Amino acid sequence: MKLDFITIGNIYIETFYNTENSRIIDFKERITGECLNIAINGSILKAKTGIVASVGRDAYGITELLEKYSIDYSNLILSKEKTGRIIKVNKEYIFEGANKFLSFEPEVLKKTRIIHV
Protein backbone atom coordinates (compact mmCIF):
# COMPACT_ATOMS: atom_id res chain seq x y z
CA MET A 1 0.00 0.00 0.00
CA LYS A 2 1.30 3.48 -0.90
CA LEU A 3 1.16 5.81 2.10
CA ASP A 4 0.98 9.58 2.38
CA PHE A 5 3.42 9.52 5.28
CA ILE A 6 5.15 7.28 7.81
CA THR A 7 6.05 8.24 11.36
CA ILE A 8 9.10 6.65 12.99
CA GLY A 9 9.62 6.82 16.72
CA ASN A 10 8.52 5.70 20.16
CA ILE A 11 5.22 4.66 21.69
CA TYR A 12 4.79 4.85 25.45
CA ILE A 13 2.24 4.10 28.12
CA GLU A 14 2.02 7.34 30.08
CA THR A 15 0.76 7.37 33.67
CA PHE A 16 -0.18 10.54 35.53
CA TYR A 17 -0.37 10.23 39.30
CA ASN A 18 -2.25 12.81 41.37
CA THR A 19 -0.81 12.86 44.86
CA GLU A 20 -1.72 14.47 48.12
CA ASN A 21 0.49 14.20 51.22
CA SER A 22 2.61 11.50 49.53
CA ARG A 23 -0.49 9.40 48.75
CA ILE A 24 -1.76 8.62 45.28
CA ILE A 25 -5.36 9.82 45.13
CA ASP A 26 -5.95 9.23 41.42
CA PHE A 27 -4.14 8.17 38.28
CA LYS A 28 -4.75 8.11 34.53
CA GLU A 29 -3.04 6.07 31.82
CA ARG A 30 -2.91 6.65 28.10
CA ILE A 31 -1.06 5.43 25.04
CA THR A 32 1.15 8.22 23.71
CA GLY A 33 4.31 9.11 21.85
CA GLU A 34 5.05 11.77 19.27
CA CYS A 35 5.05 9.37 16.32
CA LEU A 36 1.72 7.89 17.46
CA ASN A 37 0.14 11.32 17.93
CA ILE A 38 1.30 12.46 14.48
CA ALA A 39 -0.01 9.27 12.86
CA ILE A 40 -3.42 9.61 14.52
CA ASN A 41 -3.73 13.27 13.52
CA GLY A 42 -2.75 12.42 9.95
CA SER A 43 -5.38 9.72 9.85
CA ILE A 44 -8.03 12.11 11.18
CA LEU A 45 -7.10 14.41 8.28
CA LYS A 46 -7.71 11.48 5.88
CA ALA A 47 -4.03 10.82 5.10
CA LYS A 48 -2.92 7.22 4.58
CA THR A 49 -0.49 6.86 7.47
CA GLY A 50 1.92 4.20 8.65
CA ILE A 51 3.98 3.81 11.79
CA VAL A 52 7.38 2.29 12.54
CA ALA A 53 7.87 1.66 16.26
CA SER A 54 8.73 -1.05 18.76
CA VAL A 55 6.29 -2.02 21.51
CA GLY A 56 5.96 -4.84 24.01
CA ARG A 57 3.50 -7.68 23.75
CA ASP A 58 1.67 -6.39 26.82
CA ALA A 59 -2.07 -5.86 26.66
CA TYR A 60 -2.43 -2.10 26.36
CA GLY A 61 -4.50 -2.09 23.16
CA ILE A 62 -1.90 -0.39 20.97
CA THR A 63 -2.70 -2.38 17.82
CA GLU A 64 -6.42 -1.87 18.43
CA LEU A 65 -5.84 1.88 18.63
CA LEU A 66 -3.87 1.82 15.37
CA GLU A 67 -6.65 -0.19 13.70
CA LYS A 68 -9.27 2.26 14.98
CA TYR A 69 -7.52 5.05 13.06
CA SER A 70 -6.68 2.85 10.02
CA ILE A 71 -2.94 3.32 10.58
CA ASP A 72 -0.72 0.80 8.78
CA TYR A 73 1.31 -0.94 11.48
CA SER A 74 2.85 -3.68 9.34
CA ASN A 75 6.28 -2.37 10.43
CA LEU A 76 5.44 -2.39 14.15
CA ILE A 77 7.95 -4.49 16.10
CA LEU A 78 6.40 -6.64 18.83
CA SER A 79 9.26 -6.99 21.31
CA LYS A 80 9.68 -9.42 24.18
CA GLU A 81 10.42 -6.31 26.28
CA LYS A 82 7.61 -4.36 27.91
CA THR A 83 6.23 -1.27 26.20
CA GLY A 84 8.09 1.90 27.23
CA ARG A 85 6.59 3.95 30.02
CA ILE A 86 6.44 7.56 31.09
CA ILE A 87 5.53 8.16 34.72
CA LYS A 88 4.60 11.62 35.95
CA VAL A 89 4.48 12.48 39.65
CA ASN A 90 5.62 16.08 39.88
CA LYS A 91 8.53 14.95 37.65
CA GLU A 92 8.72 12.85 34.52
CA TYR A 93 10.39 9.43 34.50
CA ILE A 94 10.87 7.59 31.20
CA PHE A 95 11.54 3.86 30.88
CA GLU A 96 12.50 3.09 27.27
CA GLY A 97 11.41 -0.55 27.32
CA ALA A 98 10.83 -1.96 23.82
CA ASN A 99 11.56 1.43 22.21
CA LYS A 100 15.30 0.69 22.28
CA PHE A 101 14.75 -2.13 19.78
CA LEU A 102 13.34 0.04 16.97
CA SER A 103 14.59 -0.99 13.54
CA PHE A 104 13.18 -1.19 10.02
CA GLU A 105 14.08 -2.03 6.44
CA PRO A 106 14.92 1.02 4.26
CA GLU A 107 12.40 -0.21 1.63
CA VAL A 108 9.66 0.99 3.99
CA LEU A 109 10.65 4.57 3.16
CA LYS A 110 10.04 4.03 -0.55
CA LYS A 111 6.34 3.51 0.13
CA THR A 112 5.59 7.03 1.33
CA ARG A 113 5.74 10.68 0.35
CA ILE A 114 6.54 12.11 3.80
CA ILE A 115 8.56 10.71 6.73
CA HIS A 116 8.31 11.98 10.31
CA VAL A 117 11.10 10.94 12.70
Image (cartoon, rainbow, N blue to C red):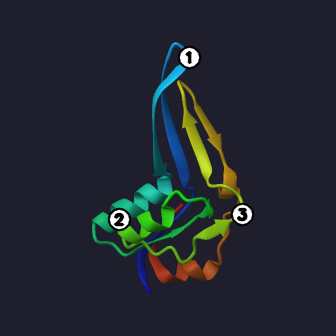
Residue 33 vs residue 87, the one in the foreground: 87
Which residue is at 71% across, 58% downward?
81
Residue 13 vs residue 39, the one in the foreground: 13
Q: Is residue 89 left or right of residue 81?
A: left
The disc, 1 or 3, on the residue closer to the chain's N-terminal end is: 1
Q: CA distance from mark 3 to mark 2?
A: 29 Å
| Local secondary structure at mark 1 | loop
Can you identify the residue that label 3 sits on? 80
24 in relation to 80, above or below: above
Q: Amino acid at mark 2?
A: Gly
Tell me whether the residue at label 1 lies in contact with that at label 3, contact meaning CB atoms closer than 8 angstroms: no
| Local secondary structure at mark 3 | loop
The disc, 2 or 1, on the residue closer to the chain's N-terminal end is: 1
Please tell me in which quadrant of the rendered image residue 93 appears.
top right
Residue extending furthest top?
21
**Image quarter in which the C terminus is found:** bottom right
Can you identify the residue that label 2 sits on? 42
